[in-house]
Amino acid sequence: MAYKEPIQIGGYTKEGFEKVRDVFQFNFYHRNEVGASCCVYFEGEKVVDLYAGYKDKDRRKHWEENTLALLFSTTKGISSLAMAMLHSRGLLDYDEKVATYCAEFAANGKENVTVRQLFAHQAGVFSNKKSFSYELLTDEKALSSALAKQKPYWKVGDRQGYHAWTIAMYQNELMKRIDPKGRNLSEFVYEEIAHSLGVEMYIGFPKEINIERKADNIPFNPLEAITGGNNRDFGKLIKNITNPFSMFYKSLLNPPFAINLNNFNKRKYIEIQNGAALGFSNARGLATIYNEFATGGKKLGIRNETLKELAKTPIAPKIRRTDLVLGVNIPFSVGFAKPSTYQNFGIDYKAFGTFGAGGSGAFADPTLKVAFAYVMNKMGTHIANDPRELALRQATYDCVLAIEHNRNLKKEVFATKVE
């Protein structure tokens, strides 16, 4: 249901970025937005910081400045930035074997899998023969054992298949063994990233935070996925969604509680510390974090070698580029989605980020020094390029490129010599 009453937008927009605000408002009137936030940094300066709408589907609780939202796979980018920090500190080598850090990972033919292959979703461990029940997910020892014993579904490096939940499970296993303080991924993200940059970013909704601060997750109606419009990704995948033998089902719907999207409003499940899908923040928090990596990483002490790794072009799988789970071409490198013809974000191949089920997304563009983030609570039906996020992303670059164009015009004027 689109808004009929005037939408009250909170926040800030710098001169030159009014188009982003206009699109943000348009989303509420014409793209069924319920509650959302959007934040943009350009050249280290916060130029957009907007929020509006409601936290609940009944539209009784206003979305506030510091409202937290479920990020789904947008969480993966933050988890991968944590791993990048290990790399920057000389504790993790992307081209080293995973088993070097986690000896038990070598079981069942995984002894030669590199960190780079795992983080590129090419290791073939996108699911597990065991069901990721709530009991297993909250039993650290048992979960670690199940992950280590899993046999790859294909020859490592030959194919790519989205490790929807498992990617961060393996990252967590690495973090626990590599971090000198023995912290898990959730603890590292909070202490080394969020706290250091003065923002809120949590993996697993913290027990000590009032749940009223969180926006409700509002699932899409199944009919929305199969009727009307173009690029209804979940509609195209409906057979896989309902087929427990499909790779899509095995990857995205194991753990079983993920089958019912309303479970993502239950404290029992959202407190699980999974860095692939159960992150909580707002656009301001995400954009602030990505801004650090888009502008040189000085506050967090990120080495230039690491920033170059994040900006690299991805190494494609040997046999097939189309993702076996998602059915589209989304290349990954060191844990991040990279620009492609399917999802063309940033100004060039150096951009990196992740996008979440339902529509959220965040990324860094080191070439233009742009950091962009959008989060919402009303789920859309696209794997990527949700119309709301895409329109905001495009508006952001319209504004940035207009500024760049005007700068170049001024340079040409000042360079002109009067004879």
Image (spheres, grey):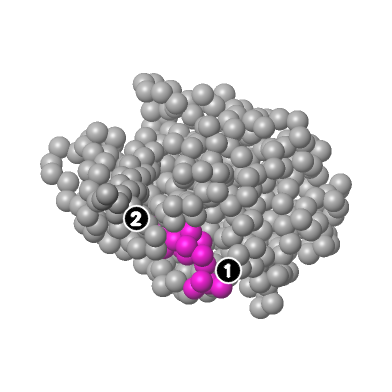
Q: Residue flagged by tag 2: what amino acid is it?
A: Cys
Q: Which residues are magenta?
A: 283-301
From this viewpoint, which residue is outermost toward the left? 5
- What SS does tag 2 mark? strand
Q: Provide the major secondary structure of the magenta segment.
A: helix
Tell me: 325 left or right of 109: left
Please tell me how crowded label 1 is: few (under 14), some (14-19), or many (20+) other residues with Cα within 10 Å.
some
Front residue (pair 296, 254): 296
Report the number of numbered marks.
2
Of the image marks 2 and 1, the number of the one nearer the N terminus: 2
Residue visible at 42% across and 67% down in the picture = 200
- Residue 182: give x, y in percent of width and height: 68, 75
Q: Which residue is mark 2?
A: 39
- What SS does tag 1 mark? loop
Tell me: 221 left or right of 278: left
From this viewpoint, which residue is outermost toward the bottom? 181
Q: Which residue is mark 1?
A: 302
